[in-house]
Image: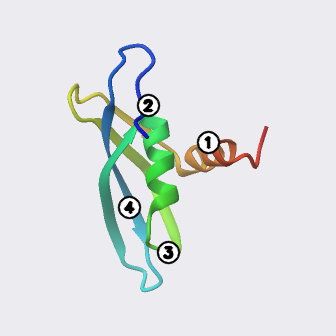
Amino acid sequence: METRNALEGKTEMFKVEINVELETRRIVKIHGWVEADTPLDAAVKFKTKCLCDPVTWCDPVMVVERNTYVMANYANESVDIASDYAVGLRE
């Protein structure tokens, strides 16, 4: 399934970067490319599909759009709330 930007009619690729603290108290940067409609959607998709199991997700969650270099940053709490809405835990 392909996601499309409603305003421009094209697919957007975003790079998402998050720092996490592991059980060993070590801070590790994780990052990857995500296909989404908005930067917040990209942060939600990346965080929900992330395979690591950190003790702490460190702020901020950084997102940049591939073609325009438009950047956004979010607090982890904001991404968690958006995730809850995305999966139907909140209305």
Sequence-wise, which precedes: disc 2 or disc 3? 2
Q: Quadrant of residue 51?
A: bottom left
The residue where tag 3 is placed is: 53
The residue where tag 2 is placed is: 37
Label 1 crowding class (10 Å Cα cut-off): few <14, some 14-19, many 20+? some
Identified by mark 4, the residue type is Asn
Q: Residue at x 51, y 47 (%)?
A: 44
Q: Nearer the viewer, mark 3 or mark 4?
A: 3
- Which label sits on residue 82? 1
- Which label sits on residue 19? 4
Q: Position of residue 62 (x, y in %)?
A: 36, 45
Q: Residue at x 48, y 37 (%)?
A: 40
Label 4 crowding class (10 Å Cα cut-off): few <14, some 14-19, many 20+? some
Q: Residue at x 42, y 33 (%)?
A: 3
Identified by mark 1, the residue type is Ala
What element does badge 1 sit on? Answer: helix
**Marks 2/4: CA distance?**
23 Å
What element does badge 3 sit on? Answer: loop
Toward the right, the furthest residue is 91
Q: Nearer the viewer, mark 2 or mark 4?
A: 2
Sequence-wise, which precedes: disc 3 or disc 1? 3
Identified by mark 2, the residue type is Asp
User: Are discs 2 and 4 less than 8 Å apart at CB?
Assistant: no
Identified by mark 3, the residue type is Asp
What element does badge 2 sit on? Answer: loop
Q: Position of residue 10 (x, y in %)?
A: 32, 23
